[in-house]
Amino acid sequence: MGIAALITAIITFVLAVIPCVGLIAIIPGIIAIVLASVGLSQASRRNAPRGVLVAGLIIGILASLISLSQLFVAGKIAKSADKWPDGIQNIINDVQDNVIKDLEDANISIKVESNGDKVEITSNPEKENREKTLENLEGGNKEKNDSVPKKK
Amino acid sequence: MTVYQRKSETGNNLKVRPANESYLIINLFLAGVILLIFAYSGFFSPDEDKYPVTCIHEKITGEPCVSCGLSHSFSLIVRGRVAEAYKWNIYGMRIFLFFALQLVLRAAFSIFYMKYRNTRKQLIVIDCIGSGIIFIVAFRQFIVYIISGILS
C-alpha cells in the first residue's frame, strides 16, 4: 500500500508541474492520498513502519495542491482572456459616443431643390437650437405638403 | 528473482530479495514509467501529429502554455532530430534529459543499494536530494510559470 501510494504520488508530482497535463494530476493525486491514508490507518493498527506511507501522503498532498493551483492559473488566464471582448466593446462605445458628440456639435446645412424652389436649412452647432429650428419649421409648415410630387 | 547474499551485523549470511525491498520496487516502477514515456514518444510519429494527449490548459484558456509541444519535441529527440525538437518546445531537451538521467540513476542507485548494505540510508537521502535538485533545474521554467500565474 505504501509503495503504491509513493509511486502514484511521485508520478502525480511530475505530472502536476507540467501545465499541459497538470489538471489531470488531481486524479492520481487523490488516489495517492487515499492509498496513503488507508495504509497509515492499517499501519497504526499493526504497529507497522510508516515512513513510506507518510512520504506518499506528503508528496500526494503537495502534488494535488500544485495541480489545483494549475486550475487556478488556468482560470485566471481564461478570465483575463474573457476581458478582451469587453475591452473591444468599450472602445466601440467610446468611438460611437465621440461620433454622436461630433455630430451634435457640427454645423449642418441641408439644401433641398424641387421644381425651381430652393429650401436651405442651416443648423446651429448647439443641439437645442437645431431642435428649435426644426420645431419652427414643422410648426410653420404644418399644412404644407412637403412631399416631393410624383412625376407624371 | 535474483537472490543476493549479504552479511548481517552479527556476521550471518542473509538473503536479500529485491521483491522485499521497497526502494528497489519504487525504482523499478519509476524506471518502467520512464521507459513508457520513451515508448510513447517513439510510437507516435511527429510528422503525423496524432498525439492522444492534448493540452488542457490551452483548451481552457485558449492560449498555448509553456509545456505545449513537449510530446512532439520528445518524439523528435527520440528520432535524433534535436534541432527540430527545440522549435516545438525549447525546454523539451532539458525535460527529456531529466527523464533519461533518472532512468540511469534508478539503475545505478538500485545496484549500489544491493551492493553496499551499510550505506543504504545515506544512499536514499542522496537520491532524494539529488533527484530533487535535478527536478527543480529541469522543470524550473514550468515552476516559474505556475508561480507567476498564481502571483499575477
Image: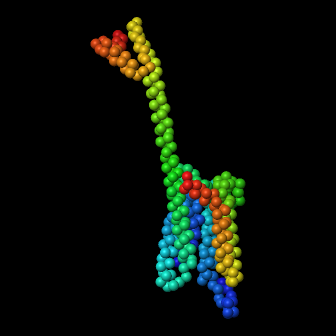
Q: Which picture quadrant has residue B112? A: bottom right
Q: Judge from the rendering whether residue A1 lies leftward or rightward of residue B4; answer left or right.
A: left
Q: Which picture quadrant has residue B26? A: bottom right
Q: Is residue B125 above or below residue B149?
A: below
Q: Position of residue A63 (x, y in %)?
A: 55, 66
Q: Judge from the rendering whether residue B93 lies leftward or rightward of residue A142; answer left or right.
A: right
Q: Position of residue A110 (x, y in %)?
A: 43, 15
Task: Name the residue rendered at 69%, 71% in the picture.
Answer: B104
Residue extending farthest to the top is A116
Q: Is residue B87 above or below residue A4?
A: above
Relative to the observer, which residue lies in front, A146 or B83? A146
Q: Is residue A23 visible?
A: no
Relative to the observer, which residue lies in front, B143 or B151? B151
Q: Is residue A2 above or below residue A102?
A: below
Q: Position of residue B32 (x, y in %)?
A: 62, 71
Q: Is residue A149 visible?
A: yes
Q: Please count the marks in the image.
A: 0
Q: Position of residue B89 (x, y in %)?
A: 64, 55
Task: Name the residue rendered at 40%, 22% in the picture.
Answer: A127
Quadrant of the snapshot with the N terminus of chain B: bottom right
Q: Which picture quadrant has residue A3? A: bottom right
Relative to the observer, which residue lies in front, B20 or A139? A139
Task: Name the residue rendered at 54%, 71% in the picture.
Answer: A58
Task: Name the residue rendered at 54%, 56% in the picture.
Answer: B150
